[in-house]
Image (cartoon, rainbow, N blue to C red):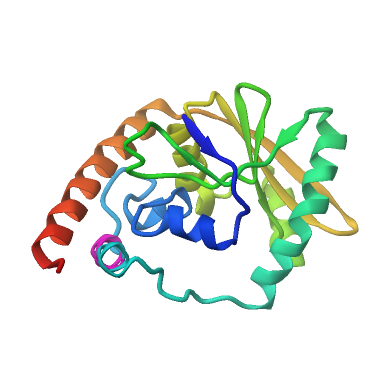
Amino acid sequence: MIAIDVKQGGEEWFKLKCGKPGSSSFDKIIQTNGKPSKERKKYLYRLAGERITGKQEATYSNAIMERGIELEVEARVLYEIATGLDVQTTGVCYPDDTDAYLCSPDGLVGEDGGLEIKSPLMATHVSYLVDNKLPTTYFQQVQGSLLVTGREWWSFMSYYPGIKPLIVRVERDEPFIAMLKSELDLFVNELETITTKIGV
């Protein structure tokens, strides 16, 4: 794993991510059952456009998303207090020097772990607490982060001020990770072909 310490959300961070598939969008490449996502082609074409222009298209942001960004710091501190583990922040992680795909973890924990933090709406947070497991919505992201970093486990944390947090440890799902890697390799090769074909 190669970790690059840049400020998430900053200009350099966007530059490092531009035109490369990231774990938060791996669900656009592969479904939880291993089959290709229906959003695959659209995501492929978007990344091809980013590679050609060198720019990321503006993405949708709303008050809920902005709130999540603001709460991330206090959630990370609470995670450290609750678990007794130190969290190291970083900007972007690549699996190797080919930097074909990436993840932007909310933290790296020790030598073997990582952290993904979500700050959802109240009802959603309560539903996560009731289920007491990794929400299916984030399965590809978390397993993708484990693939990219090569780490053994990942903590998923849901945080809402005034309600107890959900912290669950997610282990590697090796069969899915193998399918994900295969799909990513195909995706990246196709991305290179398309970019070469239409690039100027």
| Picture coordinates of residue 51, whole percent (x, y) | 29, 62
Q: Is residue 43 magenta?
A: yes
Give me the residue at 76% from left, 63% from top.
Answer: 70
Question: Residue 34 at what x, y percent from top left?
Answer: 31, 43
User: Which quadrant holds residue 110?
Assistant: top right
Q: Nearer the viewer, residue 196 or 37?
A: 196
- Outermost residue toward the right in this view: 162
Identify the image quadrant of residue 197: bottom left
Q: Position of residue 87 (x, y in %)?
A: 73, 35
Identity of the residue drawn at 84% across and 28% down: 84
Task: From the image, give the main secondary structure of the stretch colored magenta.
Answer: helix
Span highlighted in magenta in the image: 40-46
The percent coordinates of residue 109 (x first, y second) are 68, 30
Q: Nearer the viewer, residue 130 or 7?
A: 7
**Quadrant of the image for the C terminus?**
bottom left
Q: Nearer the viewer, residue 159 or 2?
A: 2
At 47% across and 26% down in the image, what residue appears?
A: 150
108 over 152 or under it: above or below: below
Check if residue 3 falls in the magenta segment: no
- The mark total stands at 0
Relative to 50, does residue 143 appear above or below in the rendering?
above
Image: 91 above or below 96: below
Q: Going by the image, does 27 lie left or right of 52?
A: right
Please give the name of the residue rendered at 62% of the width and 21% of the height, measured from the top-left corner.
Answer: 111
